[in-house]
């Protein structure tokens, strides 16, 4: 059976919540609150559902109108939410089931005037069975949690040096998990927002305190906050997401005045210890903003041998319309004094969205 849930409808929303609570391992990345707070809301959000012989596969994603320079084209596209998303499936699902699921997805997209689909996958091979192009998008750190002594020795020298300095500076840590008090969320938010201001972050990253409170209170088993203290002052803080056997570094910040005490290295070190003590297999730090940039290299210094490739999927449903939309975009770009886009450029997808 193949079905579609429209998550802006209350009945479908409740059905979705029931599916994710009964059919899969826990994941912060498929909760309604994650979509609502961190991915732009639930308007236009659907979930494609495939059931067969007590097996379940789902694919949440956004359907959006395709506008070319503010003109509605009458066509739509599909994309999965930001982060480690893509399809979710029960443990009994095999490759044949996944191939059948993705064929159903493609047929449904075609029947609903959808031109293209962009799929963000996780780091646990959920791209298997996908019937479009799979792209190696960027390098990520999928840190494996191992025994304490080996882990310490595997850190790059600068990490060990910085952790020792933080300890000499008498920094302390505390990780809050389940029933996180509002004052802890507030302390995280203060450090986070100050960091966003200092780094001139995009407006979309300025989440409100209430948004964090809603997410944390609704998903107490799927998030944690690590605070690093200098005395009573929170100098570095990170919101961690939890999915099955993994802890994910999600959002955080550090007060600039305390950089020299190395609180951020100490925070990562303490999260790794906490993950080990609580039976997690991975601490996933993600990647940088660009290919092997400074942020990526910093993350790699904690897990030099745990570099993996983050993959995304591209599926063009209607090639003729896809090309015509690209041409239409180029016509408008030229009118505005911009250069035309190479319609075969694979560095950007979907190409018709490259409008500035």
Image (cartoon, rainbow, N blue to C red):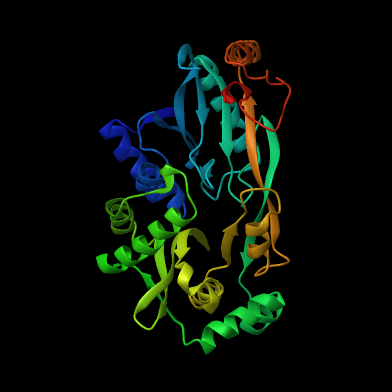
Give the total of numbered labels: 0
* In the displayed structure image, the side of residue 271 where residue 348 appears, left or right: right
Residue 15 position in % (x across, y down): 33, 38
Residue 240 position in % (x across, y down): 45, 62
Q: Residue at x 67, y 64 (%)?
A: 300
Depicted 316 relative to depicted 270: above or below: above
Depicted 91 relative to depicted 173: above or below: above
Q: Residue at x 68, y 81 (%)?
A: 150
Depicted 279 relative to depicted 332: above or below: below
Is residue 276 among what the camera can see? no
Q: Using the image as rendered, state which of residue 217 and residue 281 is in the foreground.
A: 217
Q: Residue at x 38, y 49 (%)?
A: 206
Is residue 161 among what the camera can see? yes
Q: Using the image as rendered, state which of residue 300 and residue 261 is in the foreground.
A: 261
Depicted 33 relative to depicted 157: above or below: above
Q: Using the image as rendered, state which of residue 97 and residue 107 is in the foreground.
A: 107
Q: Residue at x 30, y 67 (%)?
A: 180
Which quadrant of the figure has residue 160? Answer: bottom right
Q: Quadrant of the C terminus?
A: top right
Residue 59 position in % (x across, y down): 49, 36
Which quadrant of the figure has residue 161? Answer: bottom right
Residue 68 position in % (x across, y down): 52, 16
């Amino acid at each position: 059976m193949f079905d579609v849930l429209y998550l802006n409808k209350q009945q479908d929303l409740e059905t979705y919540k029931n599916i994710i609570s009964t059919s899969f391992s826990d994941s912060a990345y498929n909760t309604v609150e994650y979509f609502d707070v961190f991915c732009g809301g639930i308007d236009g959000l659907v979930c494609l559902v495939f059931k067969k012989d007590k097996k379940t596969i789902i694919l949440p994603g956004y359907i959006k109108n395709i506008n070319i320079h503010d003109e509605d084209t009458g066509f739509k596209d599909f994309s999965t939410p930001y982060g480690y998303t893509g399809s979710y499936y029960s443990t009994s699902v095999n490759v044949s089931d996944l191939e059948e699921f993705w064929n159903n997805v493609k047929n449904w997209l075609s029947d609903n005037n959808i031109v293209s689909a962009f799929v963000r996958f996780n780091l646990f091979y959920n791209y298997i069975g996908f019937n479009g192009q799979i792209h190696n998008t960027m390098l990520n750190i999928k840190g494996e949690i191992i025994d304490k002594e080996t882990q310490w020795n595997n850190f790059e020298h600068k990490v060990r040096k910085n952790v020792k300095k933080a300890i000499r500076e008498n920094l302390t840590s505390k990780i809050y998990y389940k029933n996180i008090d509002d004052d802890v969320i507030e302390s995280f938010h203060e450090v986070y927002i100050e960091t966003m201001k200092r780094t001139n972050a995009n407006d979309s990253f300025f989440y409100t305190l209430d948004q964090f409170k809603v997410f944390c209170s609704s998903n107490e088993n799927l998030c944690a906050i690590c605070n690093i203290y200098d005395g009573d002052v929170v100098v570095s803080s990170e919101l961690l997401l939890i999915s099955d056997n993994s802890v994910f570094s999600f959002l955080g910040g550090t007060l600039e005045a305390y950089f020299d005490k190395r609180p951020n290295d100490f925070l990562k070190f303490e999260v790794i210890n906490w993950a080990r003590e609580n039976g997690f297999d991975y601490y996933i730090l993600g990647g940088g903003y660009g290919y092997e940039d400074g942020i990526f290299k910093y993350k790699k210094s904690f897990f030099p041998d745990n570099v993996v490739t983050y993959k995304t999927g591209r599926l063009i449903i209607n090639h003729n319309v896809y090309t015509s939309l690209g041409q239409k975009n180029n016509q408008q770009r030229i009118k505005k004094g911009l250069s035309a886009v190479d319609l075969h450029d694979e560095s950007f997808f979907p190409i018709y969205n490259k409008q500035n």
